Image (cartoon, coloured by chain):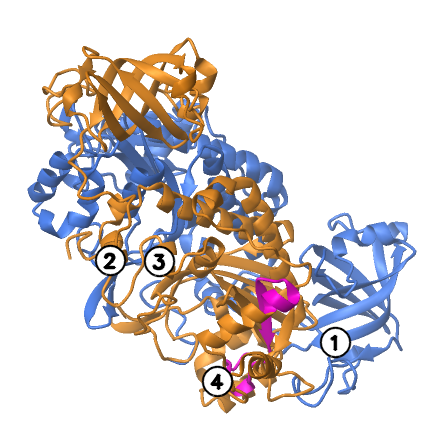
Chain colours: A blue, B orange
């Protein structure tokens, strides 16, 4: 790498250096004392390596006050010896890479056939004793209270590696299909979805709001680029304290013009998910194994049922009578996914045609039955991870619908301008990144799949000086 | 494409279909009447095509109320004829692709050697007459007041196409160098950089803030993944009304462990910029041409000077005496870039070693001269586009520095936990996406390079129902 100036060897490359002296850097993951010999497991971003330290190996300590009178570090001894280094200490170690004896081979790590014999150790940073063993079961609250420490486990790293690959797959697929990425504002002058559950911001001498979705902006951008996507935070000021809700989450949004109806949008999502699974298979096989998670099979055609049909299924198959209700509750979603898995061998199920009155004013009513909309939710392993559908693209109809929903069209003139000057038939969807991550990985609580989750009580107020 | 169900031919592919009847879709970009024959320029996401409409060509109108009693659209005539269609109308046109006569060839468009003879026109959406000609010079306020309309120009499309490619290049380069992407929260319990210029949010029964940067989170994440990046909105409640400031902007952030000093971070930025320029050369040559913009040359090694040296240069070369001042003002930045271009043939210049007292408490003091820091700004064509540097990674030193800055370490325990349990020497930087876009493209006001800019008076309050 051009900017790796320290001639550091990454641990993943150490097996290629048997017989050579190389330098590695990383924190101590574990320490084992075997009489006078000390074994250190050193971790870097690429792997884990066992380092054998024989008594007398030179240990160079950092200056006691970095930024003080010392040089670039490492010149003066602050009295740290091999006896003092413990997990968390960050070291640079030069040493000889040697094959292990046959019986010392560790098949569970990639470098398990070799080890390093330390020749010189430099302490780059010290660490206090760990407050608890984060690799053991700790309660969710403790876990979340100490994320700067608890995120440093194989489990947490695996979750957020997978999350980063999910986002990348979403973008890469859409880029390959001519979608243009855009940056949506999060600060808005009006609340986007109707006023409830919105966070208020003091914006100079007036009030602003945190956007609940980039909905209006992505529709505006269809008029510019025809196919667009954006990934960013959205906000829900919901008082819920459940395993499914967080107050700030990452929404993966797309919107596209020239569709026939909502089935075109469902087709895009089906293809995105198939691509995502293929990519995760390649990039995150180790992470899925570590987490004991199974990649879903994405059917060529994810099954779909209308809400009314879904309610019939719930009655017939599970004896649950919710016919006529405007939405599904979490138990219904779980049961429908059971049905879908059993009947269609699919972890996914689209539910379409939610009632017109219960969807936002921009939702396209089905011309064949205008009481219901060309909208859909996607259920995945029992949980709703997407809402999407076709939108109303006709200016006059949209304007009259705004009034019909009891809202004032004069408050929407900016949004309406996109339709006033011509908008193709269009639609889109939003996928909740954290929920999708949780469901891919079999994680019960979405907070564990959210890097720094916000809920009613949790907002990192010890981060800073407020 | 799997989900293009309408057998639509993209305009970019029409030259391959000479002699065939195909169907295109898109809005009317321009209409020219030549006696009874009407020429329509149709635009889709891939290009522009001239369509010749002879009197009597069938025009199928949409149902008057979409979602009303009609079918999938296009069945009933609402009385729209060829005479009525004007720019903005969205059409689907089936027609014969024919070569143009030699003298009708238009070398300025990619389809300039062909045209379509319309056989059937379907009106997918109507449009009102345009309020003004957005391709002509309009004032910035008018432009910004009508973005849903004014973004539909070649100029605006080019700007935001380039912006999307800049973001992608940032991510692609860092991914190739083992950086892991993460999602940073924007809602924080404390203000990240010291308390001034922060937007306040009503967070249930307490106050929260909009993050001014993902600084603390990206440092925390170095302890998890060693090398990380994140792209997202950041907030500055500044009252400035200048061509350089916006209140919500997109920050491209990276942070990495195991550095020697700030020069490693500058090396990364140098390499990112070189990669970006290579990518833009490939993907956005047309856009740069359209905007009359010149891609910068990124030197193998961008020159760097210490702040004090920069001030000497300003005095010697430009007669500006600002020696001893803690920062550069915009005029100084412009002059230094002039100097850098002339002396080093570089559009870029790193200025390093800002005074310790003027930088945040986490900035690493230069051990050789602790009054100054291992920090840098990057100037590009006269404007600061990046701040970065090495951070303090030693727990005790950081904690004592927080107190020295007049802050209470007890309010930072969460952040400090990342250092308490071991943190490698590390640093990072942030690049302002909109400023970078503006400078790449020679755009005077950063608001024109911001998709939906927020300033003191502008926050889209006609978007919705607040």
Q: CA distance from mark 4 to mark 2?
A: 45 Å
* Side of A244 where A392 appears, left or right: left
- Residue depicted at x 29% and y 34%: A427
Q: Are the residues under marks 3 and 2 on the same chain?
A: no
How far is the residue under mark 3 from the one under mark 2? 32 Å
Q: Position of residue A9 (x, y in %)?
A: 78, 59
Residue beneath label 4, please? Answer: B409
Q: Nearer the viewer, mark 2 or mark 1?
A: 2
Residue underneath mark 2: B141
Mark 3 and mark 1: Cα distance apart in space: 39 Å
Q: Secondary structure at mark 1?
A: strand
Stretch of the chain drawn in magenta? B340-362
Residue that mark 3 sits on: A248
Residue A279 placement: quadrant: top right
In the rendered view, does B150 fall on the left or right side of A355? right
Percent x, y of residue A276:
50, 37
Is the residue marked by circle 3 packed among few (<14), some (14-19), or many (20+) residues within 10 Å? many
Pair 3/2: label in front: 2
């Amino acid at each position: 790498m051009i900017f790796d100036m320290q001639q550091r060897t990454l641990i993943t490359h150490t097996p290629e250096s048997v017989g050579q002296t190389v330098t590695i850097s990383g924190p101590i993951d574990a320490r084992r004392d075997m009489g006078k010999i000390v074994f250190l497991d050193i971790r870097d971003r690429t792997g884990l390596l066992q380092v054998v330290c024989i008594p007398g190996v030179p240990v160079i300590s950092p200056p006691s006050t970095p930024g003080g009178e010392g040089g670039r570090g490492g010149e003066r001894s602050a009295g740290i010896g091999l006896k003092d280094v413990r997990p968390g200490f960050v070291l640079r170690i030069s040493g000889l890479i040697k094959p292990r004896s046959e019986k010392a081979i560790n098949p569970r790590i990639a470098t398990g056939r070799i080890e390093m014999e330390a020749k010189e150790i430099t302490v780059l940073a010290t660490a206090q004793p760990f407050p608890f063993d984060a690799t053991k079961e700790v309660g969710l609250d403790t876990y979340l209270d100490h994320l700067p420490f608890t995120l440093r486990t194989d489990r947490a790293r695996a979750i957020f590696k997978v999350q980063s690959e999910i986002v990348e797959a979403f973008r890469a697929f859409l880029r390959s299909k001519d979608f243009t990425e855009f940056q949506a504002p999060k600060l808005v002058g009006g609340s986007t979805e109707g006023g409830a559950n919105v966070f208020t911001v003091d914006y100079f001498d007036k009030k602003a709001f945190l956007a609940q979705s980039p909905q209006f902006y992505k529709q505006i951008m269809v008029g510019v680029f025809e196919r667009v996507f954006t990934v960013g935070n959205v906000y829900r000021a919901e008082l819920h304290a459940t395993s499914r809700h967080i107050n700030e989450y990452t929404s993966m949004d797309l919107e596209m013009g020239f569709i026939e109806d909502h089935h075109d949008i469902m087709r895009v999502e089906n293809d995105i998910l198939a691509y995502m699974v293929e990519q995760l298979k390649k990039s995150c096989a180790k992470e899925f194994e570590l987490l004991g998670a199974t990649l879903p099979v994405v059917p060529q055609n994810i099954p779909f049922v209308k809400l009314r049909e879904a309610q019939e299924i719930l009655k017939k198959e599970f004896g649950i009578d919710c016919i006529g209700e405007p939405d599904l509750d979490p138990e219904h979603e779980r049961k429908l996914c059971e049905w879908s898995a059993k009947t269609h061998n699919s972890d996914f199920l689209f539910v379409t045609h939610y009632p017109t009155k219960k969807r936002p004013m921009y939702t396209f009513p089905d011309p064949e039955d205008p009481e219901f909309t060309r909208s859909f939710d996607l259920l995945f392993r029992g949980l709703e991870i997407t809402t999407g559908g076709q939108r109303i693209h006709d200016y006059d109809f949209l304007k009259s619908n705004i009034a019909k929903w009891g809202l004032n069209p004069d408050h929407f003139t900016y949004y309406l301008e996109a339709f006033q000057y011509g908008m193709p038939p269009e639609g889109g969807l939003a996928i909740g990144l954290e929920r999708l991550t949780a469901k891919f990985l079999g994680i019960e609580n979405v907070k564990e799949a959210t890097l720094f989750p916000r809920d009613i009580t949790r907002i990192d107020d010890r981060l800073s000086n407020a």
